[in-house]
Image (spheres, rainbow, N blue to C red):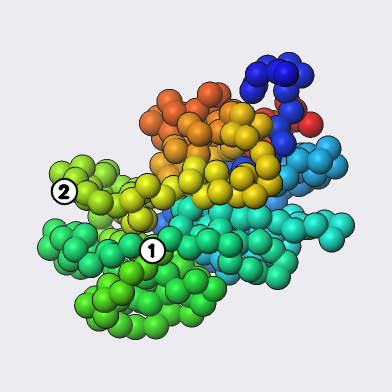
């Protein structure tokens, strides 16, 4: 049996991030400002992987309603099959079509949200409502989050356990959010910094890796037979867990260091370049 990443090896599962891997948009970038399209090279590479029998698993920070249009765009699932998906940075897994929830993990975000707001009181807060949208303390910039938005005060937002919280400050930078998160420690949760001042909060121990592990167990596939491709800080655990983890060319240095290899940037169809090695 060939080792991951060596000649003769072929992944049974291809785990793909969406923003910054399939699409040029990234966290905190208004998707309405950029047309979300799959380039012919990436589509053809995915088609070859599917034809070879690989399972394509989208693994993303997006919520369910932001993922199903991508599956439709890719023409997945095919031939009466079912697509399995890791959503909300691992807090949610589901099958498609139709959408059927497989797992959800929640956590008490009240303490950490209040702690963060002591330092960035102007921040926008969004709590995920699975399959619906978000409950928010104020409206986010157009295109940054999707689905229905319900306005609530912060106390109501975090009064019950949630799957995911987004903290967003359009007036801060990603570097300032990284420094703040490191200074506070943010114990008892997982957190991910986006390309801008965008902070995703998730339950402790939950990541794309944990969600992907759950999905692969459903498929009967070991980590050694998984190829994972991503570009964000929320991809690090997934890239480390997979038999072969590949960072996109534009990924931050810490993401590239976590990967087994680095492909070209999303603008250069890096995902297609990597897939062409195996399919």
Q: Which quadrant of the view contains residue 65?
A: bottom right
Instruction: Name above or below for residue 222 compared with residue 165.
Output: above
What element does badge 2 sit on?
Answer: helix
In this view, the residue in front, 22 or 14, is 14
Instruction: Name above or below for residue 189 compared with residue 223.
Output: below
What residue appears at the point 38 percent right and 77 percent down from the top-left corner?
A: 135
Distance, label 1 to label 2, CA atoms, is: 22 Å
Q: Position of residue 213 (x, y in %)?
A: 55, 44
Residue placed under numbered mark 1 in the picture: 106
Q: Position of residue 115 (x, y in %)?
A: 16, 60
Looking at the image, residue 133 sits to the left or right of residue 266; the answer is left
Instruction: Name above or below for residue 154 compared with residue 228.
Output: below
In this view, the residue in front, 178 or 236, is 236
Label 2 crowd bin: few (<14), some (14–19), many (20+), radius 10 Å:
few
Looking at the image, residue 73 sits to the left or right of residue 120; the answer is right
Residue placed under numbered mark 2 in the picture: 184
Residue 170 has which mark? Answer: none
Label 1 crowd bin: few (<14), some (14–19), many (20+), radius 10 Å:
some
In this view, the residue in front, 182 or 272, is 182
The mark closer to the camera, 1 or 2, is 1
Quadrant of the frame with the N terminus: top right
What residue appears at the point 41 percent right and 50 percent down from the top-left corner?
A: 206
Label 1 or label 2, whichever comes before in sequence order: 1
Q: Which quadrant of the view contains residue 37?
A: bottom right
Are the two marked residues, 1 and 2, in contact with CB atoms closer than 8 angstroms?
no
What element does badge 1 sit on?
Answer: loop
Q: Position of residue 77 (x, y in %)?
A: 77, 57
What residue appears at the point 22 percent right and 49 percent down from the top-left corner?
A: 187
Q: Does the rendering let one see residue 3?
A: yes
Quadrant of the frame with the C terminus: top right
What residue appears at the point 75 percent right and 58 percent down from the top-left corner?
A: 82
């Amino acid at each position: 049996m060939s080792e991951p990443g060596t000649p003769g090896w072929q992944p049974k599962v291809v785990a793909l991030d969406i923003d910054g891997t399939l699409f040029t948009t990234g966290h905190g970038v208004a998707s309405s400002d950029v047309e979300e399209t799959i380039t012919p090279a990436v589509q053809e590479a995915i088609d070859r992987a599917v034809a070879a029998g690989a399972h394509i698993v989208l693994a993303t920070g997006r919520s369910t309603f932001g993922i199903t249009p991508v599956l439709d765009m890719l023409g997945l699932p095919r031939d009466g099959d079912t697509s399995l998906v890791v959503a909300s940075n691992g807090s949610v897994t589901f099958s498609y079509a139709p959408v059927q929830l497989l797992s959800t993990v929640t956590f008490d975000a009240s303490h950490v949200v209040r702690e963060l707001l002591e330092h960035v009181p102007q921040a926008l807060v969004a709590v995920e409502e699975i399959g619906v949208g978000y409950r928010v303390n104020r409206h986010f910039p157009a295109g940054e989050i999707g689905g229905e938005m319900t306005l609530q005060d912060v106390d109501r937002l975090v009064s019950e356990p949630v799957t995911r919280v987004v903290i967003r400050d359009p007036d801060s930078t990603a570097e300032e959010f990284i420094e703040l998160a490191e200074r506070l420690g943010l114990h008892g949760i997982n957190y991910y910094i986006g390309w801008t001042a965008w902070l995703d909060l998730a339950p402790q121990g939950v990541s794309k890796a944990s969600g992907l592990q759950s999905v692969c167990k459903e498929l009967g596939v070991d980590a050694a037979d998984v190829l994972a491709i991503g570009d964000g800080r929320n991809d690090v655990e997934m890239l480390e867990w997979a038999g072969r983890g590949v960072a996109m060319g534009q990924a931050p240095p810490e993401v590239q260091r976590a990967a087994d290899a680095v492909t070209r940037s999303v603008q250069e169809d890096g995902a297609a370049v990597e897939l062409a090695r195996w399919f």
